[in-house]
Image (cartoon, helix red, strand yellow):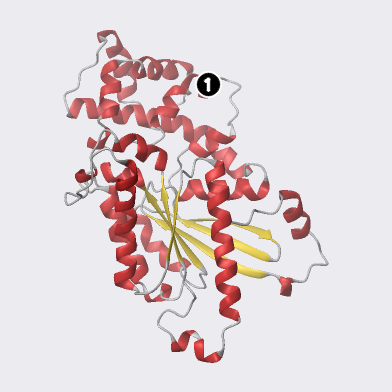
Amino acid sequence: MGSCMSTKSSLEISKDPTRSEFNIKKFKILLLGAGESGKSTVLKQVRLIHRGQMHPKDINQCADAIRKNALESMQSILRAMVVHKIPLANPNNSYARRRLYHLPEDAVFTPEIADDIAALWADRGVKYCYERRDLYWLLDGAAYYFDEVERLASSDYHPTDNDVIMARVRTTGIDSADFIDPPYHYSVVDVGGQRNERRKWVSCFQNVNAVVYLVGLSGYNQCLYEDSTVNRMQESLKLFKQVVSNPIFKHTPIFVFLNKKDLFEQMIKKSSLKTCFPEYQGRDGDFYHALLYIQNAFVKIMQETCPGKELYIQIISAREKRDMEVSWSGVKATLRSIYNDASAQTIKNSPENSSCPLPL
């Protein structure tokens, strides 16, 4: 896979007033996927890859967001403990539980709140409920927030790159990043994945050169934020079929990022893939075969929807910068190859004369 050009080169050329716009080929890449699949994380990593540093917007959002994530995640666990009748192991922690349980989400994140979260995170009952998180909605980064909670509450706290990547801010509306990797101009667009945000997707569908569809692998054993009765993976498969069935994407390259492989590898050891796919015949706990089964489920949808059209699949952990560098380079290299080849096609091979005209 081709490597990204250095940040210095990209920025210098993008500021060059003598550069001809006619030498720039523009690619619009649309990030789609259900909620909690990792689209915003991918966008933040893309910004980091091409700028060499975190975007000020992401840093400014992070401090408040990650503190809110920590409180929201502990409250989710405490509510689940009530629903599923899981007691605290240490009765002394009942005071911390009482203080946190009814705090409003916009409460000022004080060192005292951080101390309560840390005390509860050390409780074996809380840890047991955390291990049962397939029963309720919980942010994937919860353990990270709890482990770092005292640092997050310090008066001189400044977000690290990893904090920015781990902070969860639900996308409402449309977010985007533009960058130049000469001679190409990339515009990457992220839209909210929750159900109430999807009506906004159609406004972004015009002139799209590629769709990158995000799938949270760990979702096979998790429920939706907006509907705790719906499995995240089943929702992702259903939504993927809707995307690839849309006529506007008939000739558009589709990439699937099977994301959160690290969480999936941990989870598959404890929870069978049969919880999502009862027909699965593989051995429980087998990471490779479970992953292959999920991958084939998306390939099957593509084959049924557009026979002969290739599906480009990457298996990643979007939190890991190296994973994103490799996978993003792969996306760019594939797009350059597809569209350079397509531009050289003769009239008889034009889209009007082919059901799947791109060399996919």
Q: How many marks?
A: 1
The answer to whether 195 is drawn above or below residue 19 in the figure is: above
Residue 189, horizontal then vertical, whole percent: 52, 59
Residue reaching furthest to the right: 18
Q: Position of residue 205 (x, y in %)?
A: 46, 69
Q: Seen in the image, is 231 located left or right of residue 100? A: left
51 left or right, relative to 205 = right
* Residue 267 higher or lower than 337, as above or below: above
Q: Quadrant of residue 99?
A: top left
Query: According to the image, label 1 marks what residue?
Result: 151
Regarding residue 106, the answer to whether it shows in the image is: no
Looking at this rendering, what residue extends furthest in the bottom direction? 348
Residue at 59% x, 32% y is 160
Q: In the image, what residue occupies the spot 58% across and 24% down?
A: 157
Identify the residue at the far top of this view: 92
Which residue lies at the image location 80% right of the left edge and 61% below the top edge? 16
The N terminus sits in image quarter: bottom right
Q: Amino acid at mark 1?
A: Arg
Residue 86 figure quarter: top left
Q: Is residue 12 above or below residue 225?
A: below
Residue nearer the viewer, 218 or 130: 218
- How far across and how far down the image is residue 288, in percent? 34, 45
Query: 10 Å neighbourhood of mark 1: few (<14), some, or many (≥20)?
Result: some
Q: Quadrant of residue 191?
A: bottom left
Task: Describe residue 106's horizontal placement relative to residue 95 as left or right.
Answer: right
Q: Is residue 175 visible?
A: yes
Q: Nearer the viewer, residue 134 or 136?
A: 134
Q: Secondary structure at mark 1?
A: helix
Q: Position of residue 105 (x, y in %)?
A: 39, 32
Say above or below: 38 vs 20. Answer: above
